[in-house]
Amino acid sequence: MAGCYLRNIKSGFLLVENIGLINILLLVLVILSVIVVALYLKQGRSEKRSQQLAAALRKEIQAMSGSTIGMGKRIVDIEAKLELSLEKQLELEQRDPDEVAYSQAARLVEMGANVDDLVQSCGIGRPEAELMTLMHKELSPRHSLKKH
């Protein structure tokens, strides 16, 4: 009976040891489960933030692309205007120099230039300058109002 009692005590200790070991293993399992759940939640938040950043970057890229396209169109328009200006400049350079001088003289007469100004600025002769000044006086609206 003493042997049986000792065996029961040993079995009880083994059972207590096994229960303690099981409790420790359960505790480790619970801790590991909490860690896994925490990591899973953190990973979910990180993924959501990454998606938000990617969406913001996509919007910025679209805005920049639109701006780039708009700038490209403006550059094309400016190039067309520049080409037209260069063509007009070439056309003016190829004109008869006397015609350019008389056009400039006509503008100066309209602005009130006198005969000497026309001769010096435009390189036309004095008789032509006097004729242009006289024609401007005769054809100007102010002079025609005085006659009537």
Image (spheres, helix red, strand yellow):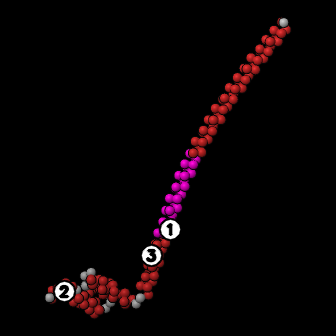
Q: Nearer the viewer, residue 37 or 60?
A: 37
Q: Earlier in the sequence, mark 2 or mark 3?
A: 3
Quadrant of the rendered image containing residue 27: top right
Instruction: Give residue 59's position: percent from left, percent from top.
Output: 52, 55
Task: Write the residue at 76% across / 17% down.
Answer: 15
- Image coordinates of residue 141 in percent, x first then y, are 21, 85
Q: Quadrant of the C terminus?
A: bottom left
Give residue 72's mark: 1
Please, is residue 6 above or below residue 77 in the view?
A: above
| Three-letter amino acid code at the position of disc 2 | His
User: What residue is at 27 percent from the left and 81 percent from the top?
Assistant: 111
Check disc 2: other Cα within 10 Å, few if <14, some if 14-19, many if 20+: few
| Mark sitting earlier along the chain (3/1) | 1
Distance Cα–Cα, label 3 vs label 1: 14 Å
Q: Secondary structure at mark 2?
A: helix
What number is the disc on residue 92?
none
Residue 143 - label = 2
The answer to whether the residue labelled 3 contacts the one labelled 1, judged by CB atoms less than 8 Å apart, is no
Which stretch appears magenta? 49-74
> Which residue in the structure is indicated by mark 3?
81
Location of residue 25 by image quarter: top right
Q: Position of residue 86 (x, y in %)?
A: 45, 79
